[in-house]
Image: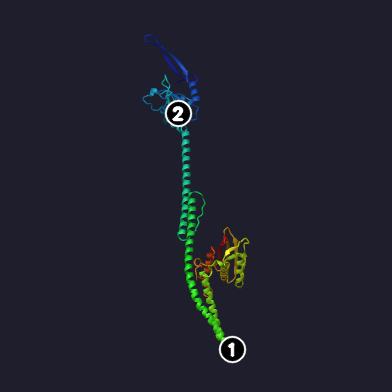
């Protein structure tokens, strides 16, 4: 490559003149400017950061878009990839493409192709970072997306793991509470998924277990009441006979004493006092035996004593009978009676006795005064009565036994322990239920439910 007088690059192309006999008589020499080649390379290169240049077989620049490198006669041998033995097959349709270290010291992706008919070659180089920028961007984007997706999946998995473990822990605690005897315990259901279905099934099982235990308790109570009732009836009848004899004897003694006093004109005060004491104690024993008979239900088992009654009227009558005791203990009474309460066919006096017993218990639990409220309400299939007081209350241990015969929390002499047992029997005989809820130091609520009368036989 040479420079002309204007500093423009050119090269000389010599074509020999051959005559007959293969004698060379001379040559035609042409000076070819490389400026047009340089301009063409500048247009073709185009891509930012890429270079297109022309080299000879010795690695000298013939053309480059940066013409200063041509002028400096830059050796670009380092940019010539190692050619295979099939070097002659390298054409523009089949170039050699490799990654290598360029003559500039930068790692590039280069394409190498020979110019047919010459010893020249065209080299196209682009920095590896730019050549693979789309791939690198795609790789980074895909990698980042994969990481984000994995983190998302991991987060969701952890969420469900924690959620399931928490629900299983709730279920485990519920099972422990039921196995400890807390039948009817209900777990909160916050979803309708499989876990929610499991919790719902657990609640249904808990409710069924509660009903079963209540039924077993009722059967045990009924069996106990029946056994004690038979015993009480036998004892009552056995005691009634001597009590009647004692009562008649006392009356006979009084008559004889009065006759003797009239004849002698004197009156023995001590004997009268003793006879009164005997009569009072005999009456007390008779009342106890009467309670035993009421408890045994051997005197209230005939339907000929049944009639229609109004629960509201029975409440008012019971309040009148207990008026003195309630007033004495300074108990404030409030009641809310539902006017829609229907008539009920059954043992009205027996139900009134139940209400009377409940009012007596409430009054005795509020010796220093308190508030008593009675509420009646007509429900879908029954009539409900609630007796609520804010008295002393009953402990959980005693609450389990309040309907047992002869069990009482009252001091000696203030109760026989038969009032609630008799009430329980009367309500059961009426086909109803009686439930007591109490907390020590807060008060007691007794709920009585009596079924509607559907048919009178």
| Placement of 285 over or under 60, stated as above or below | below
Q: Is residue 30 above or below residue 448?
A: above
According to the image, what is the colour scheme of the structure?
A: rainbow
**Which one is in front, 159 or 395?**
395
**Quarter of the image containing the C terminus?**
bottom right
In the depicted view, which residue is nearer to us: 288 or 241? 241
Q: Nearer the viewer, mark 1 or mark 2?
A: 1
Where, quadrant-wise, is the N terminus in this rendering? top left
Q: Are there few (<14), some (14-19), or many (20+) residues within 10 Å of tag 2? A: many
> Regarding mark 2 in the picture, which secondary structure is present there?
strand
Q: Is mark 1 on a helix, strand or loop?
A: helix
Residue position marked by numbered label 1 in the rendering: 262
At horizontal 58% and vertical 90% (from top left) the residue drawn is: 263
Residue 171 visible in the picture: yes
The residue beneath circle 2 is 125
**Marks 1 and 2, how far apart at CA:** 154 Å
- Pick whichever of labels 1 and 2 is earlier in the sequence: 2
The reply to whether callout 1 and callout 2 are in contact (CB within 8 Å) is no
Closer to the camera, 82 or 140? 140
Q: Residue at x 49, y 63 (%)?
A: 218
Q: What percent of the width, then of the height, locates residue 45?
A: 49, 26
* Residue visible at 48% across and 40% down in the picture: 145
Give how far across and how far down residue 254 sits, in percent. Answer: 56, 84
Q: Is residue 122 above or below residue 371?
A: above
Q: Is residue 437 in sight in this rendering?
A: no
Q: Image quadrant of residue 316?
A: bottom right
């Amino acid at each position: 490559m040479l420079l002309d007088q204007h500093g423009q690059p050119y090269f000389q192309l010599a074509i020999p003149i051959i005559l007959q006999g293969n004698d060379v008589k001379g040559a035609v020499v042409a000076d070819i400017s490389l400026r047009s080649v340089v301009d063409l390379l500048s247009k073709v290169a185009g891509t930012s950061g890429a270079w297109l240049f022309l080299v000879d077989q010795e690695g000298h620049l013939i053309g480059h878009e940066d013409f200063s490198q041509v002028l400096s006669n830059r050796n670009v041998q380092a940019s010539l990839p190692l050619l295979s033995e099939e070097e002659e097959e390298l054409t523009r349709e089949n170039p050699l493409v490799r990654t290598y270290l360029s003559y500039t010291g930068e790692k590039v992706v280069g394409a190498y192709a020979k110019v047919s008919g010459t010893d020249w070659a065209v080299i196209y180089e682009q920095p590896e970072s730019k050549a693979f920028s789309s791939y690198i961007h795609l790789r980074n984007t895909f990698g980042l997306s994969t990481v984000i997706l994995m983190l998302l999946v991991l987060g969701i998995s952890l969420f469900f793991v924690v959620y399931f473990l928490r629900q299983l822990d709730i279920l485990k605690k519920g099972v422990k509470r039921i196995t400890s005897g807390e039948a009817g315990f209900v777990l909160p259901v916050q979803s309708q998924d499989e876990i929610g279905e499991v919790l719902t099934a657990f609640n249904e099982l808990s409710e069924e277990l509660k009903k079963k235990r209540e039924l077993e308790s009722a059967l045990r109570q009924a069996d106990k009441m029946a056994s004690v009732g038979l015993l009480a009836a036998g004892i009552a009848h056995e005691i009634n006979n001597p009590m009647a004899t004692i009562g008649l004897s006392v009356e006979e003694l009084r008559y004889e004493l009065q006759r003797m006093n009239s004849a002698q004109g004197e009156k023995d005060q001590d004997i009268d006092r003793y006879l009164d004491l005997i009569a009072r104690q005999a009456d007390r024993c008779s009342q106890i035996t009467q309670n035993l008979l009421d408890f045994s239900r051997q005197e209230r088992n005939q339907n000929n004593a049944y009639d229609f009654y109004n629960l509201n009227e029975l409440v008012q009558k019971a309040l009148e009978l207990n008026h003195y005791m309630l007033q004495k203990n300074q108990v404030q009474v409030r009641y809310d009676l539902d006017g829609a309460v229907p008539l009920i066919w059954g043992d009205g006096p027996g139900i009134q006795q139940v209400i009377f017993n409940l009012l007596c218990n409430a009054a005795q639990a509020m010796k220093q005064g308190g508030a008593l409220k009675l509420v009646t309400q007509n429900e879908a299939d029954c009539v409900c009565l609630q007796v609520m007081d804010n008295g002393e209350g009953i402990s959980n241990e005693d609450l389990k036994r309040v309907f047992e015969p002869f069990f009482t929390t009252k001091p000696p002499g203030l109760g026989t322990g038969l009032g609630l047992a008799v009430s329980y029997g009367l309500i059961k005989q009426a086909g109803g239920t009686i439930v007591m809820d109490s907390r020590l130091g807060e008060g007691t609520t007794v709920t009585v439910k009596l079924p509607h009368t559907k048919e009178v036989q």
